[in-house]
Structure formats: C-alpha cells, structure tokens
C-alpha cells in the first residue's frame, strides 16, 4: 500500500508542478510583446507575472522607505535609490519556481482543501517576504558597494533562504498533518488547584 501512496503522491506533485511551471513559462512567452508568440489577450488578462513583479517592486519600495531610504521606481522593472544605482527585476527574480514548488508540495499531500489553502498562503507569504527583503537588501548593497557573501550572487542566496524556509515548512506541515507535533499535554480536571 505504501508503494501505491508514494506513486500517487509523486504523480500529483510532478503533474501539478509541471502544469503550474510550464503554464507560467507559456504565459511569459505569450505575454512578451517582443516575442514571436505574443498574444494580447494573454498579456492583458492572464499575465500574473507582471502583477507579481509590480507587487514585489512596490513592497520593496515600501520597505526601503520605511527604513528611511529615498527609493523610487524607475520603470516597471527597476527600483533605484535617489542619486544611486538600481536593481532590475527580471523574470528569474520573481521567485515563481520556488512558489510553484511549495504549491505543488502542499497540493500533492493529504489534507482538506481549507487546510491546504492556509498552508499554501502561509508558505507563499514567507517566500514573498524573503524575496522582498532580498530585493531591498540588494539595492542597499549595490549602492554601498558591499561585497557578495562567499562569492554567491543574490539569486543563489535567495534560493538558499527560500528552500531553507520551505524545508522548515515541510517539517512543520508533516508534523501538523501526522499529529506528531510535540505539544503541552492538557491538565485533567482533578489535577487543577
């Protein structure tokens, strides 16, 4: 029986990951106005990547301004500090692959619909927060000429942070779903003072 459950899990995970990932890649291809496959309707009504980029840039802008930095949006792809350099947010910066991995993991597991939606939303919020902080720190770093840590670029550090967060979330998801979470035991009525 375990072999069947594992195969079913892997099928659900791989199928959902593939549909979401390659569907996203198709949306990117069909919504790129310079591309040979451009479709206006896809760009106008289904281009959620454009929305994710807009949200990422505006959240990073808000965070930087919260900490007193004079940042602004140069265009739909670039955030800058006044009188300084900028960060250009391309498709690879959005983190859709990491987010899709998390969605596919939760979807493939057992659990009711509401619980899965809560876990997906929580994981996406954590990944999103890591990415907003990364973009903000990168802008501060390039303007202050900070060296890269261990000669790893910002994409590598984002992946390390995001997948570490996902491993923690997977651990917690498993503990909450299997009931193996260590909690304080309830006090019996006759033990109360």
Image (tube, helix red, strand yellow):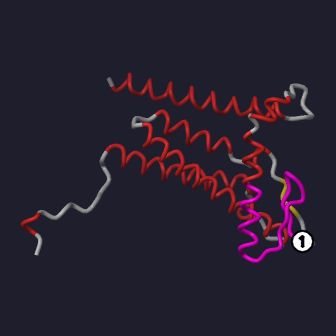
Disc 1 element: loop
Q: How many marks?
A: 1
On screen, residue 171 versus residue 35, left or right, reads left
Looking at the image, is 103 positioned above or below residue 72? Answer: above
- Mark 1 packing: few (<14 Cα in 10 Å), some, or many (20+)? few
On screen, residue 108 versus residue 91, left or right, reads left
x and y percentages locating residue 111 in the rendered image: 39, 37
Look at the image and say whether residue 135 sits in the magenta stretch.
no
**Residue, disc 1:** 82
x and y percentages locating residue 37 in the rendered image: 86, 25
On screen, residue 115 versus residue 99, left or right, reads left
Looking at the image, is 34 positioned above or below residue 3? Answer: below
Look at the image and say whether residue 79 sits in the magenta stretch.
yes
> Residue drawn 44% across and 35% down?
109
> Residue drawn 42% across and 28% down?
6
Q: Return the residue nearer the eye: 85 or 33.
A: 33
Q: Which residues are magenta?
A: 56-82
Query: The N terminus lies in which quarter of the figure?
Result: top left
């Amino acid at each position: 029986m375990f072999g069947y459950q594992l195969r079913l899990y892997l099928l659900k995970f791989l199928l959902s990951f593939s549909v979401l990932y390659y569907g996203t890649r198709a949306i990117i291809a069909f919504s790129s106005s310079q591309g040979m496959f451009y479709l206006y309707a896809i760009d106008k009504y289904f281009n959620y990547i454009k929305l994710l980029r807009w949200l990422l840039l505006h959240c990073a802008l808000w965070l930087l301004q919260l900490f007193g930095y004079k940042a602004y949006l140069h265009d739909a792809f670039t955030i800058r500090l006044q009188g300084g350099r900028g960060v250009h947010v391309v498709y690879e910066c959005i983190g859709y692959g990491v987010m899709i991995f998390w969605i596919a993991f939760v979807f493939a597991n057992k659990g009711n619909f509401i619980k899965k939606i809560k876990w997906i939303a929580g994981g996406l919020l954590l990944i999103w927060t890591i990415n907003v902080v990364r973009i903000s720190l990168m802008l501060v770093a390039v303007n202050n000429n900070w060296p890269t840590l261990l000669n790893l670029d910002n994409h590598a550090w984002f992946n390390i942070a995001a997948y570490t967060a996902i491993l923690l979330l997977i651990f917690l998801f498993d503990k909450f779903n299997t009931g193996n979470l260590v909690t304080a035991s309830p006090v019996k009525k006759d033990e109360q003072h």
